[in-house]
Amino acid sequence: MTAFIHENFMLNNETAVQLYHSYAKNMPIYDYHCHLSPKDIAENRKFNNITELWLEGDHYKWRAMRAHGISEKYITGDADPKAKFEAWAKTVPYTLGNALYHWTHIELKNYFGIEELLNEDTWEDIWNRCNELLQQDDYAVREIIKRSNVKVIGTTDEPTDDLQYHAQIAELPDFPVKVLPSFRPDKGLEINKATFIPFVETLEKVANKSLATYEEYIAALLDRVQYFHEKGCRISDHGLSEVPFAEFDENELDGIYQAGRKGQAVSLEDENKFKTAILIALAKAYTERDWAMQIHFGAIRNNNTKMFKRLGPDAGFDSISDQGEVAAPLNALLDALEIRDSLPRTIIYNLNPVSNELIGTTIQNFQTNEEGIAGRIQFGSGWWFNDTKPGMIRQLTALADQGILSHFVGMLTDSRSFISYSRHEYFRRILCNLIGTWVEAGEIPNDPALLQRLVENICYNNAKNYFAVDVD
């Protein structure tokens, strides 16, 4: 009987098989956006068991387990790791049709050589086999990364981080992977959230001075941009619930900042003025340093108040937002940056697929540049709830339909798991199958050189050329 995850998994035509095995399969990975722990990489963490590796912090799995009726004790609670794994294993057979079912079995095969299906009958044997392998030195974090053929990792970091672990990693003599910080200043923009005042207070400690005015505050943020740059950062990231834009007068900003410092509610208009001003200032700094800027938008977060109070953020209670207006503020924001010659290379990720064509057409408005950068403004890969087969196909086809797919910088993991690099394989299989389908339908030519360039560029080469990072 053929294993579920076999060599031609998800490759449904001969052209797809050829494209994947000849071109995509062995391309390196450029993971320019993830949530891996630099501390774990620096210390070369070894996991005590598969639960630590697989379920720790994975809110994708947590959501599925809750939907299956699993008690929170076995998800984020104090249950024994083995009992948590059993609970997950008993959930897996019910995830058919969800990408989790595919990811689970791809990861078991790729990293543990296990081809059996995970379920209520096989879980204990798989638990024992995985844990036995995890005790070996070649299952420490850095070995897993090297085995995954990763060349670059972009972590996600607070502006106030000291980046000590990145410095330690850079000095490792036997670890050739570049692990670079990414500048994520979300808390510094969200003036109406409870995290704003603590962020400013932490930034004051890092800057070693009072940030009594908006001018001092933005100067401190820009100082952190420079600090990150000196530590190798070449990418920023902005997670926005909605795309902000409002015209502002420089003289208004200090009053808005002062209100936020005092914990006073700021009007939506003033909040958008504040966010717009900061994004413009930061984008100018990114442009000057040849960084790329990422904008993720469209999530509505922490919707379950009871569970947010119990578990905090990033626990699996976020979903897709239906932001009423996207096109006008997004185009206005990009235009404001372009007018100021401050629009860096930018990747826009959209969580609500309803806006895919909107993003596809918007990025084309701002591709002009004198530096000859192909795909200067990018429609980012299927993100979060869209890094599934349907979500990836929707994003790929919308980009191809409205822009130039050939310049797409490809997949990222956006994950906290060190074995989630299998998502790149998943993406590549879907990509090759889509292209193969087009070829066999006669919609694009069956030209080997043309197809090789298309596949290899999207899998790795475009990202390598897009970001200002030297890669061997």
Image (tube, rainbow, N blue to C red):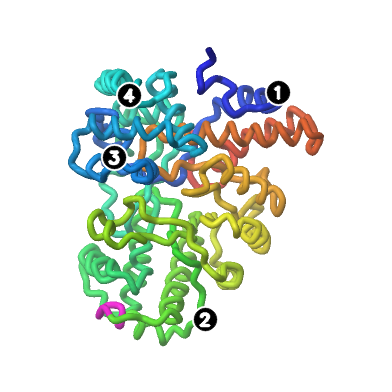
Q: CA distance from mark 3 to mark 4?
A: 18 Å
Which structural element holds mark 3? loop
Q: CA distance from mark 2 to mark 3?
A: 43 Å
Badge 3, how many Cα within 10 Å: few under 14, some, many 20+? some
Residue 355: name its quadrant.
Answer: bottom right
Q: CA distance from mark 2 to mark 1?
A: 54 Å
Between 76 and 410, which is closer to the camera in this rendering? 76
Residue 259: within the magenta?
Answer: yes
Give the labeled residue for mark 3.
Answer: 56
Residue at (26%, 47%) from the top-left corner? 164
- Relative to 374, say whether 209 is above or below: below
Q: CA distance from mark 2 to mark 4?
A: 57 Å
Which structural element holds mark 4? helix
Between 428 and 346, which is closer to the camera in this rendering? 428
Between 143 and 344, which is closer to the camera in this rendering? 143
Q: Which residues are magenta?
A: 258-263
Dominant secondary structure of the residues highlighted in magenta in the image: helix
Q: Earlier in the sequence, mark 3 or mark 4?
A: 3
Provide residue 143's location: percent of width, then percent of height. 34, 26
Q: Earlier in the sequence, mark 3 or mark 1?
A: 1
Query: Which mark, by number, is residue 14?
Result: 1
Q: Earlier in the sequence, mark 2 or mark 4?
A: 4
Residue 304: name its quadrant.
Answer: bottom left
Give the labeled residue for mark 4.
Answer: 123
Task: Give the total of numbered labels.
Answer: 4
Q: CA distance from mark 4 to mark 1?
A: 35 Å
Badge nearest the viewer, 2 or 4: 4
Badge nearest the viewer, 2 or 3: 3
